[in-house]
């Protein structure tokens, strides 16, 4: 039975499709319901997941019907048949899409890839050639994101009572953006949403009220924004029912910021006045309204909890005692922050609600109070057309590699008639691994997202996936994603500093050190001197610090922005280890089941035992002493 209350809010003349034995309305492709009505929301979720296969077929039919006359699809299609689409349209990487997106950024019409006008370009945290990727977006896509966010509300309300009796202290931020030669803005996906009328003019939702005024979220100065949002959250502490940020790393930066600034925040609360350095007019005005008047009692309470050398263990629950959970992404690279979050949380559940990217919003966690290690996402079948490339576990180090699937050819290279075989959404198999491929309403066709997922179950007919990792990414602290090739290129530049001095870099590995806030990259180097017998002379601190800085300058734009603009990554560190340390690392890996014949030094270490071994051999530690150069990326104009 369809969600009757949702239908009441729609045009009564619904169009039904006949391509399957079971009829269902086209409105399920982008349905509307009142987010204050959680029962209607849950019924709608049941409709979507029950009709997953039919909706997926209709999604593809709708996308092809709209866009079959675009320049891109005209080269492959004569009609909107699903089989023709799969036989003719290639599976592609970002590199294949760059020429089309670049042309749109330079002012050519959207019809190159999309029948609907492209209204902005969304910059992803993945990189290509050192710059963020750019994904097309449309006005309708903002409506689709709004629908997606609204679907999170009834799921949380099902598991947590009383969410309409208080507020959420969510720390949300915007990032730098640029204007392309075409006049389209290029900006991160969350910045796009927070600046949109969908967010700024959103209807009141009693289940989702923030302590942060919109003016503090939209403040372009990240420090003023952070301070103002924390101040508002402290003043409204008795109303806070849940706290969070999008990423675990951002939430922990907020805790560190509170640790560094609680005395000044208490002074503001005690006096009833905002610090003079909060100069953004809109931000200052909005905070002043909330601060309103002096509150000596609250200032004393915060001072008592934060000061006096007391441990900050459980500080969240102590400062915001009504808090029911912490909402942050704890999957993928963010899982490394779970122990630190648990230290500060006071036993509060860590809730990871959604799985999304710049390309598309994918799925929601319908069991939000599960343990972080058990988080799975149910893909919503109306968000895009989903396909999956099978992958399998490697017999060596346990990493995932592209499966030896039957291929008629490449992945969108020179021979565009050849494709890779994929599996449809409802035909994936429990326990199997896949790489996600999407066809979106906004102009991406059979696009490899680069995420590796494992099927953990089904909700009705919609599969559930655990996010395993990004393809090829070895290091990540915040929104940065450094792959093995990026790391090697940076390392190659650093070697140019030491090789003229007679040093040879014989081995290296890395890990993301999140034991402090912000976290930072650590490189373990095994060096030797030309002509020596393993003896390492005294290392010149200045030279080694130069190696650190050179590596940072050689990493991509997102990493350098996180270091310089966001302050979300700390200085890169090189730890030099003794001779034969990497032989000991190999012995450890072999003792844990790796094959001697197939062993290759891992370029990123996640095993605590292996990290402890490497740290026990360190003879010198060196940090970058300057922040790398960064400025907002520029779009190359047509010549």
Image (cartoon, rainbow, N blue to C red):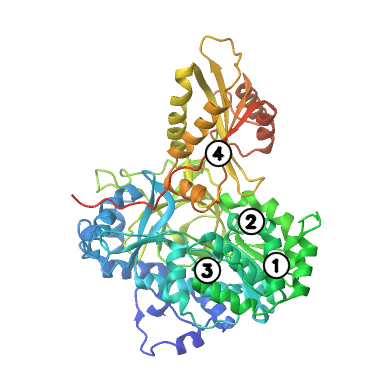
Q: CA distance from mark 2 to mark 4?
A: 19 Å
Count of numbered labels shown in the rendering:
4
Q: Label 4: few (<14), some or many (≥20) within 10 Å?
A: many
Q: Earlier in the sequence, mark 1 or mark 4?
A: 1
Q: Label 3: few (<14), some or many (≥20) within 10 Å?
A: many
Please tell me which residue is depicted at 45% across the width and 86% down the height of the picture: 7
- Relative vertical location of residue 418 with respect to residue 108 in this rendering, above or below: above
- Relative vertical location of residue 392 with respect to residue 267 in this rendering, above or below: above
Q: Nearer the viewer, mark 1 or mark 4?
A: 1
Q: Earlier in the sequence, mark 3 or mark 1?
A: 3
Q: Where is residue 293, by image quadrant?
A: bottom right
Which disc number belongs to residue 267?
1
**Callout 1 touching callout 4 (CB < 8 Å):** no
Q: Position of residue 600 (x, y in %)?
A: 53, 28
**Callout 1 touching callout 2 (CB < 8 Å):** no
Q: Is residue 57 visible?
A: yes
Q: Earlier in the sequence, mark 1 or mark 2?
A: 2
Which disc number belongs to residue 572?
4
Q: CA distance from mark 1 to mark 2?
A: 23 Å
Q: Label 2: few (<14), some or many (≥20) within 10 Å?
A: many
Q: CA distance from mark 3 to mark 4?
A: 29 Å
Between residue 522 and residue 608, name the one nearer to us.
522
Which disc number belongs to residue 252?
2
Residue corresponding to mark 3: 217
Q: Earlier in the sequence, mark 3 or mark 2?
A: 3
């Amino acid at each position: 039975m369809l969600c009757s209350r949702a239908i009441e809010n729609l045009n009564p003349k619904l169009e039904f499709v006949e391509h399957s034995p079971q009829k269902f309305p086209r409105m399920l492709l982008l349905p509307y319901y009142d987010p204050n009505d959680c029962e209607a929301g849950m019924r709608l979720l049941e409709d979507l997941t029950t009709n997953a296969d039919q909706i997926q077929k209709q999604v593809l039919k709708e996308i092809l019907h709209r866009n079959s006359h675009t320049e891109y699809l005209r080269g492959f299609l004569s009609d909107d048949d699903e089989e023709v689409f799969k036989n003719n349209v290639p599976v592609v990487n970002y590199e294949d899409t760059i020429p089309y997106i670049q042309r749109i950024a330079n002012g050519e019409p959207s019809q190159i890839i999309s029948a609907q006008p492209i209204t902005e370009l969304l910059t992803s945290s993945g990189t290509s050639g050192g710059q963020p990727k750019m994904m097309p977006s449309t006005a309708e896509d903002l409506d689709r994101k709004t629908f997606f966010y609204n679907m999170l509300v009834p799921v949380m309300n099902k598991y947590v009572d009383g969410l309409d009796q208080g507020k959420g202290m969510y720390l949300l931020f915007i990032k730098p953006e640029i204007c392309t030669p075409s006049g389209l803005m290029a900006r991160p996906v969350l910045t796009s949403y927070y600046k949109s009328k969908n967010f700024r003019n959103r209807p009141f939702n009693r289940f989702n009220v923030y302590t942060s005024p919109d003016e503090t979220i939209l403040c372009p100065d990240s420090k003023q924004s952070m301070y103002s949002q924390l101040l508002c959250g402290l003043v409204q502490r008795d109303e806070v029912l849940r706290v969070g940020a999008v990423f675990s790393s951002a939430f922990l930066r907020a805790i560190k910021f509170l640790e560094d600034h609680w005395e000044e925040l208490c002074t503001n609360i005690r006096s009833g006045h905002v610090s003079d350095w909060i100069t953004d007019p809109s931000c200052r005005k909005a905070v002043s309204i909330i601060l309103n008047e002096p509150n000596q009692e609250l200032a004393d309470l915060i001072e008592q909890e934060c000061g006096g050398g007391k441990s900050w263990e459980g500080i969240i629950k102590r400062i915001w005692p009504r808090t029911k959970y912490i909402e942050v992404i704890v999957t993928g690279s963010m899982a490394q922050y779970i122990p630190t979050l648990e230290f500060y949380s006071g036993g509060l559940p860590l809730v990871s609600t959604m799985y999304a990217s710049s390309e598309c919003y994918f799925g929601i966690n319908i069991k939000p109070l599960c343990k972080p290690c058990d988080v799975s996402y149910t893909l919503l079948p109306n968000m895009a057309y989903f396909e999956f490339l099978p992958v399998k576990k490697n017999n060596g180090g346990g990493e995932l590699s592209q499966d030896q699937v039957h291929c008629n050819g490449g992945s969108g290279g020179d021979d565009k008639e050849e494709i890779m075989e994929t599996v449809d959404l409802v035909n994936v198999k429990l326990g199997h691994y896949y790489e996600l491929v999407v066809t979106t309403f906004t102009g991406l066709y059979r696009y490899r997202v680069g995420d590796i997922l494992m099927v953990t179950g089904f909700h009705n007919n919609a599969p559930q996936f655990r996010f395993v990792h990004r393809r090829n990414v070895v290091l990540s602290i915040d929104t940065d994603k450094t792959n093995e090739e990026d790391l090697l290129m940076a390392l190659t530049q650093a070697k140019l500093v030491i090789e003229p001095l007679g040093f040879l870099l014989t081995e290296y590995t890395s890990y993301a050190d999140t034991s402090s806030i912000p976290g930072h990259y650590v490189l373990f180097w095994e060096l030797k001197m030309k002509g020596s017998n393993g003896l390492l002379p005294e290392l010149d601190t200045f030279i080694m610090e130069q190696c650190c800085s050179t590596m940072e300058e050689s990493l991509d734009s997102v990493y350098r922005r996180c270091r310089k603009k966001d302050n979300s990554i700390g200085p890169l560190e090189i730890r030099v280890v003794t001779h034969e340390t990497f032989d000991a690392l190999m012995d450890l890996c072999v003792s844990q089941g790796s094959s001697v014949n197939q062993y290759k030094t891992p370029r990123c270490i996640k095993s605590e035992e292996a990290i402890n071994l490497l740290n026990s051999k360190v003879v010198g530690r060196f940090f970058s002493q300057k922040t790398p150069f960064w400025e907002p990326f520029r779009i190359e104009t047509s010549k």
